[in-house]
Image (tube, coloured by chain):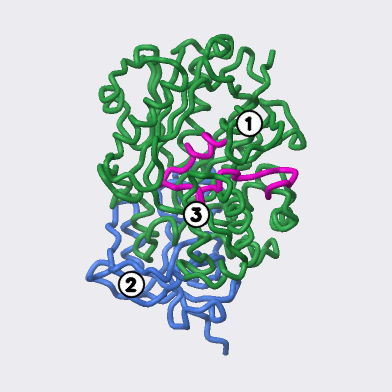
Chain colours: A blue, B green
């Protein structure tokens, strides 16, 4: 059973096109400087319509999560994280933390993360996050 | 304080609670409505206002044989009924209608004639949250808890203690689903549903319903039951996406709705005798105690551990056993309101002696909406 995937809208298409190219695209208000997510063609802070799309660093920290022990049929059978991360640019987004054990010990709040894109379909790559590899 | 005032003159739950396979969702609305009408000594023709969540108000009006001239179909999750009370009080005071029926019915366990809660496939939540596997409230409304716990120094034991205390209250309620005492260790050894949440920390799934009837306080003395006055109320919303909740350690909805309700009631927290905080999951009473101003940030866990909310404590909370132990059909807020009304009438199974003021706090969706109602059994000028 394939994972249920997002259906882009005219207002969000740039985000999903970016993910396909390996870019995490956010928006920023040219008037007040606010970076924001999810996508919309105006600034949620000041209502300004003069906004731009930019590519974020892909760096984030772990804000909060659960480890879901009753996974949805389209996700799999093993317990998995459902997390909210704080992007380096400020906005938050929901994601899964992957490429690490799905345990409380391996998933520490505030740990550094980086984006990694999962190729799910011809149109959709989902942004996931993994622990930053320490040099 | 309201200038004239509005009171609850009818209140009832469905005849049965828990497993009711013989009734569909609208049938549960109707059973509760008929019980509330009988409680108030009213006929359907006396009702000129109708508020409900989950059912289309015209469908319910037709089913019950009502001809309302005021309706409210606000459906924002489990606290919808707190918002209905807030709206109905204003409508009665404005003269839009005189007698409002508020109903809830949900076949949460049997799933008969159940209204669909499926999110639109084109919503932002469907696009930016659903693909990551959120599977209902258990793996969604729970996500902020770990951040709250880290910020406040709260532990899994603190979550477990919420369950333990509420089970003590449930043991005194014959209609409660889970009445067997439970220990912190037993909670912490129970099945993990969505870590850090274990099964007893998650709400029940049951069938049931409830209904309230409100009218002007000046008329309330003519009804068979002791009127329960609405002293203050408030509502607020934040975001339908939990990932967009501004601060995972505090819910703006609770803060705004409670502040407005307390300001309108013109009471201080020390005057509150009884408290209900919607507990779909064990972390919500901790948020509610702090966000509504009963505890300073970080003190809710200690307040519960020191048994202030337990039987015999100074602020009895969730005295029906709550959504964790009493019942939870899906939109539990109606049952929290029913328990506040029972406490103010002096007829609750676990009655708080001499309780005069009850505060009822509801959450809707994934920290999306909030409603607060403050009741009293004392007539106000």
Task: Using the image, tell me which numbered label, if any, was put on residue B33.
Answer: none
To which residue does mark 1 refer? B261
Kindly indicate whether the residue at mark 1 contacts the one at mark 3 (C-beta within 8 angstroms): no
Residue receiving disc 2: A21
Residue A73 in view: yes
Q: x, y percentage for residue A16? A: 33, 63
Residue to which mark 3 is pinned: B178
Q: CA distance from mark 3 to mark 2?
A: 52 Å
Residue B287 placed where, x, y %? 62, 51
The C terminus of chain B, quarter of image? top right
| Circles 1 and 2: CB atoms closer than 8 Å | no
The answer to whether residue B319 is magenta is yes
Q: Is residue A132 above or below residue B333?
A: below
Q: Residue at x 29, y 42 (%)?
A: B115
Q: Secondary structure at mark 2?
A: loop
Q: Of discs 3 and 1, which sits in the foreground?
A: 3
- Callout 1 secondary element: helix
Mark 3 is surrounded, within 10 Å at the Cα level, by few (under 14), some (14 to 19) or many (20 or more) other residues, namely many
Give the prevailing secondary structure in the magenta stretch.
loop
Q: Position of residue A83 (x, y in %)?
A: 48, 67
Span shown in magenta: B310-339
């Amino acid at each position: 059973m394939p994972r249920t995937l997002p259906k882009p809208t005219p207002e969000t298409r740039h985000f999903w096109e970016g993910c396909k190219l390996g870019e995490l695209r956010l928006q920023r208000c040219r008037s007040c400087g606010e970076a924001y997510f999810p996508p919309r063609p105006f600034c949620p802070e000041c209502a300004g319509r003069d906004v731009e799309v930019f590519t974020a660093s892909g760096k984030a920290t772990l804000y909060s999560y659960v480890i879901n022990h009753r996974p949805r049929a389209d996700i799999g059978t093993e317990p998995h994280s459902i997390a909210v991360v704080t992007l380096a640019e400020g906005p938050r987004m929901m994601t899964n933390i992957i490429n690490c054990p799905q345990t409380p010990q391996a998933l520490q709040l505030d740990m550094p993360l980086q984006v990694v894109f999962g190729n799910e379909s011809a149109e959709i790559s989902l942004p996931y996050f993994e622990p930053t590899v320490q040099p | 304080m309201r200038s004239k005032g509005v009171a609850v003159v009818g209140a009832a739950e469905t005849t049965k609670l828990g497993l009711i396979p013989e009734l569909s969702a609208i049938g549960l609305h109707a059973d509760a409505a008929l019980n509330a009408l009988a409680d108030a000594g009213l006929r359907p023709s006396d009702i000129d206002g109708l508020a409900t969540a989950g059912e289309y108000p015209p469908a319910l009006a037709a089913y019950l044989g009502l001809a309302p001239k005021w309706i409210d179909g606000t459906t924002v999750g489990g606290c919808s009924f707190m918002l209905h009370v807030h709206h109905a009080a204003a409508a009665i005071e404005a003269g839009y209608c005189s007698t409002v029926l508020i109903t809830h019915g949900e076949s949460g366990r049997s799933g008969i004639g159940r209204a669909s809660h499926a999110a639109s496939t084109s919503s932002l939540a469907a696009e930016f949250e659903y693909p990551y596997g959120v599977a209902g409230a258990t793996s969604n409304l729970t996500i902020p808890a770990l951040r709250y716990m880290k910020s406040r120094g709260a532990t899994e034991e603190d979550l477990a203690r919420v369950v333990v205390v509420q089970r003590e209250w449930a043991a005194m309620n014959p209609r409660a689903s889970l009445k067997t005492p439970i220990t912190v260790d037993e909670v912490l050894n129970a099945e993990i549903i969505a870590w850090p949440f274990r099964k007893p920390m998650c709400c029940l799934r049951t069938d049931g319903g409830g209904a309230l009837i409100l009218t002007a306080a000046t008329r309330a003395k003519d009804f068979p039951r002791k009127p329960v006055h609405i002293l203050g109320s408030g509502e607020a919303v934040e975001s339908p996406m939990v990932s967009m909740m501004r601060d995972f350690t505090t819910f703006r909805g609770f803060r705004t709705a409670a502040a407005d309700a307390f300001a309108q009631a013109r009471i201080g927290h020390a005057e509150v005798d009884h408290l209900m905080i919607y507990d779909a999951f064990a972390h919500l009473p901790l948020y509610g105690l702090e966000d509504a101003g009963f505890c300073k940030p970080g003190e809710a866990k200690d307040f519960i551990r020191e048994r202030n909310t337990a039987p015999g404590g100074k602020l009895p909370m969730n005295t029906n056993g709550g959504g964790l132990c009493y019942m939870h059909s899906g939109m539990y807020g109606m049952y929290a309101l029913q328990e506040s009304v029972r406490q103010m009438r002096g007829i609750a199974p676990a009655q708080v002696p001499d309780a005069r003021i009850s505060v009822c706090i509801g959450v809707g969706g994934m920290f999306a909406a909030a409603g607060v109602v403050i009741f009293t059994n004392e007539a106000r000028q």
